[in-house]
Image (cartoon, helix red, strand yellow):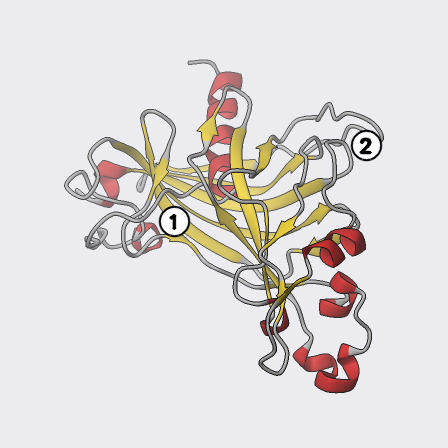
Amino acid sequence: MNRNRKARLVGVIASAVAAMALVAPASQADTPAPGYGQFAGCPTAAEFPGVAVCTAGVIKGGHFQMGSKDVPIEKPIKMSGGQLENGFIVANSKGGLEAVKQKVPGGVIGLTGLTWLLEFLGSEALTLYAVTELVGPPQITGTGLNLPLRVHLINSVLGNNCYVGSASTPIKLTLINGTTSPPPPNKPITGKNPEFGFDAATEIISIKNGVFVDNSFAAPGASGCVLTLFGFIPISINGLVNSQSGLPAPAGTNETTQNLDLEIAPTKKVYP
């Protein structure tokens, strides 16, 4: 396998992890060998047959913009798992993706336009968070990763089930570290190839400072958002969320970047 092909392969694996492509956790986790503790979320052959390599990484930053709302990735998101030969990423009970809350600029007021809420609740109670969740199996291709997502909008004012995207209408990302070809009005953007390292003793491949991008995806409208103040009958505010956020947003009007560090190790080294 030539150098360029190897780089593309590792880049694809990195994009899978960067995009949070972790299938539902398997059963009880085993303990990795000394020096491989970061791969604790990778299943053994007994836990999940067919795992080829173990992965552990962190999304250090970036942003996720849908419609008129742009959420910075300010808190690092750790993840670990293992890659199957068919390209899927699986995790045991110690692995998967951290459910890290990212603060949404403008809070609930910016999301809904209901300025009168400040009089009853105050600005702290109206802080809004977003958590990205996987809603279907990812598909690793020759150039990147196809990933179906939803974004959970978290604040008690919105109820417990306020989402953008769902299993039936996912946000479909295709993350690459090359140059995108989005529909207008978006212009092409380019990711960044990571810096590669290799430790011969541990056989760990390190991937540092990679940037994976997509600005060709569409974002559906919000669902499950309800106003639940003071015990009154819940009132749907999906329309308010959509109008204030520019949703649904067609392909060519959204963008995400993810800054990634990643380590990859052979399963046989992690679990000798």
- Label 2, label 1: how many angstroms apart (C-alpha)? 33 Å
Residue at image mark 1: 80
Q: Amino acid at mark 2?
A: Asn
Q: Secondary structure at mark 2?
A: loop
Above or below, comparing residue 268 to residue 93 in the picture: above
- Place residue 199 in its image quadrant: top left
Nearer to us: label 2 or label 1: 2
Counting from the top left corner in percent of width and height, residue 251 is at 72, 31
Residue at x 45%, y 58% (from the top left corner): 98
Toward the viewer: 19 or 110?
110
Label 1: how many residues lie within 10 Å, few (<14), some (14-19) or many (20+)? many
Residue at image mark 2: 186
Q: Residue furthest front?
A: 233
Counting from the top left corner in percent of width and height, residue 134 is at 47, 45
**Sequence order check, earlier mark of 2 and 1:** 1
Quadrant location, the N terminus: top left
How many numbered marks appear?
A: 2
Above or below, comparing residue 84 to residue 26 in the picture: above
